Amino acid sequence: MAHLRASVWGPAEFVGRPPWWLVVEGLLAGVLGSGAIVGATLYGAWTGRPSLADGEAGLVCAGALAVYLTLVGAGRALVGVAALLGTCLALQTPQAAAGIVLAERGQVQSVVVTSVEDGRGAGGGRARYLCSVADADGVPLKVRIWRGCGRETRPGDALAVVYDPKRRVSTRGSQRGADGVSAPFGDLAPWTVALTAVSLLAVVRSYRLSGSAGLPTSPARDGTAGY
């Protein structure tokens, strides 16, 4: 049972508080892993690189973090949770990254609604109305807008949209009350904090006195040898 518990949750062969350097290592693993997932996607959205902006690079970073936790001897359950949280963060980041780009350099323009679709017809989920729009020259936009599009919206109404002058992210409806880049980052904060916390716990519990997991050896605090 002890061997099974160590395999699933990590050996955690220390008495009292974990070594400070182990805590630092765990924090660095979580912060750098989360930062790499978000940073790679944000860089892709800012520079217009689809392979990065779509979250593929973020998934690679999440996998790399899971591999690192495995190499240091973290418990399998914690590695799995970290991999799941990293994947969720990578999938959530593309929309937030696009919002950050639009908040930084986006410009607002007025468009005309050409048709309104009731999203409830697709079944399931909350009601969402989708508006097809055209610019001032009558050219239809390729994206449909849901921000600002509601039950009372009719063809011919004007909507405000925000677009990227460099055309690297999709146009979206202008969200009233949005607070710059803080709103997109706020959506990612819970995932980032959770991933950092699990990474910290996984690294701390990977500590072995025997050094069999590749970590530095250390005498036991009570003077006995580890096993």
Image (cartoon, rainbow, N blue to C red):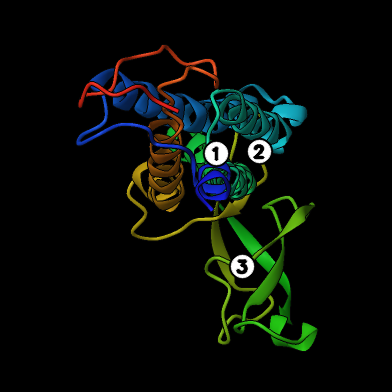
Q: Can you say whether 156 is above or below 144 in the image? A: below
Pointer 3 residue: 146
Whether residue 162 is visible to the viewer of this picture, yes or no, is no
Residue contact between numbered discs 1 and 3, judged by CB atoms under 8 Å: no
Residue contact between numbered discs 2 and 1, judged by CB atoms under 8 Å: yes
Q: How many marks?
A: 3
List x then y, in percent, for residue 19: 26, 23
Q: Amino acid at mark 1?
A: Ala
Closest to the observer, 122 or 61:
61
Q: Can you say whether 12 is above or below 26 in the image? A: below
Q: CA distance from mark 1 to mark 3?
A: 18 Å
Residue contact between numbered discs 3 and 2, judged by CB atoms under 8 Å: no
Q: CA distance from mark 3 to mark 2?
A: 16 Å
Which sits earlier in the primary sequence, circle 3 or circle 2?
3
Front position among marks 1 and 3? 1
Closest to the observer, 25 or 145:
25
Residue depicted at 60% across the width and 25% down the height: 40
Pointer 2 residue: 169
Closest to the observer, 32 or 39:
32
